[in-house]
Image (cartoon, rainbow, N blue to C red):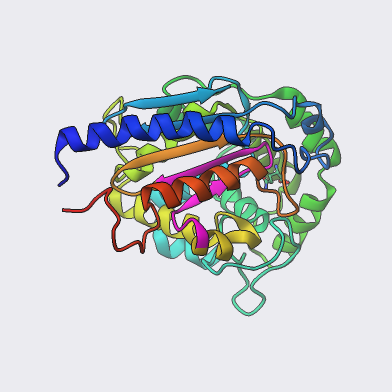
Amino acid sequence: MVEDDERQRRIEWLGQVCIGLHEQFGPLTEGAPAAYIPELSNVDPDLFAIAAVALDGQEQLTGDHDHLFTIQSISKLLLYGLALETHGREAVLERVGVAPTGDLFNAIELDEERHRAPNPMVNAGAIAITDMVGGSREERIEGIAAMFERYLGRRPEIDDAVWKSERATGNHNRAIAYLLLSHGIIEDRVEETLDVYFAQCSVLVSARDLAMIGATIANSGVHPVSGEQIVSPRVARDMLTVALTCGMYDYAGEWAYTVGIPAKSGVGGGIVGIIPGAGAVAVFSPRLDEHGNSVRGLRVFEALSEEFDMHLFDFDRPWTRA
Ligand code: GLN
């Protein structure tokens, strides 16, 4: 284990670097907020936050770190953990595989050979995972809210306007859901399952919340502040694996190559990057590239990965070195 004062020094240095990167990339206005969900385009595109949380709960916060935005696809990672905890690996793998697709996050495609969704980080997989949450509509939403409460340390709030907006315009997701139904992967309650899926995408989080969520997963499933074991170490490992291979959608390969840490992004503008055994960093900036990933977020993580040798295959990786 690295010495405590060395770790402390590194966390403070990380905080300083984040302040510098916030200044450096603030003027970057490339990309645009998601518009296919009309309500998302009303966001102030200049919002920008970087937050880091270490395993002991120490925080380094920069910019609009308390601004609340919708979690969107980052919820997919948490729902995957919930499904693995509730149903076990075998049952989940029967419906959702672990293969990166190389296609857009909302591609209307399945693993036709195995009759399952390609992976839990794209919409098809997340809708299939949402179907696995049992009970009535209310019970399913409550089950997901209870899970969020354990990560956030408060009752989750849903952005009603975004939820409604997704419900009203989500025909692409409807097409995915009916394809899943036609293969017998989900039950015949498509509108309800989509409603639950849209609800979880509309949960409000801050960059700071995302970093805390990431730090929980980095900490083998133990919340850094409450000390609660939210998912088992084995489930945390599975979550990290799919985050590394599929978390950035069709950019996952490039991300693994350049940044090299498990991560998940959402079209609300959030990205959480997880450094197993060390902590997590989250960036919020709503302007997205063509893959649906935050443009400033990508730049910040590329710079951080270089500066701190964060890449999992950096032989000089200081974070968890013995
Ligand atoms: N709610 C969004 C959708 O289903 C989530 C997509 C995302 O964040 N990539 O389209």
Q: Nearer the viewer, residue 316 or 194?
A: 316
Write the start and end of the magenta stretch as one range. Answer: 258-274
Residue 67, position as x, y percentages in the image? 60, 21
Task: Tell me which residue sits at (50%, 32%) in the image.
Answer: 20
Q: Nearer the viewer, residue 183 or 306?
A: 306
Question: Where in the image, quadrant-wise, is ligand 1 located?
Answer: top right
Residue 223, position as x, y percentages in the image? 32, 33
Q: Is residue 192 left or right of residue 66?
A: right
Q: Is residue 213 left or right of residue 247?
A: left
Residue 43, position as x, y percentages in the image? 75, 26
Q: Is residue 110 left or right of residue 18?
A: right
Task: Tell me which residue sits at (53%, 67%) in the image.
Answer: 97
Task: Tell me which residue sits at (62%, 60%) in the image.
Answer: 251
- Please say whether residue 139 is visible from this viewpoint: no
Q: Is residue 38 magenta?
A: no
Q: Is residue 138 left or right of residue 84?
A: right
- Please say whether residue 270 is visible from this viewpoint: yes
Residue 204 vs 181, above or below: the answer is above
- Total numbered circles: 0
Task: Tell me which residue sits at (61%, 68%) in the image.
Answer: 116
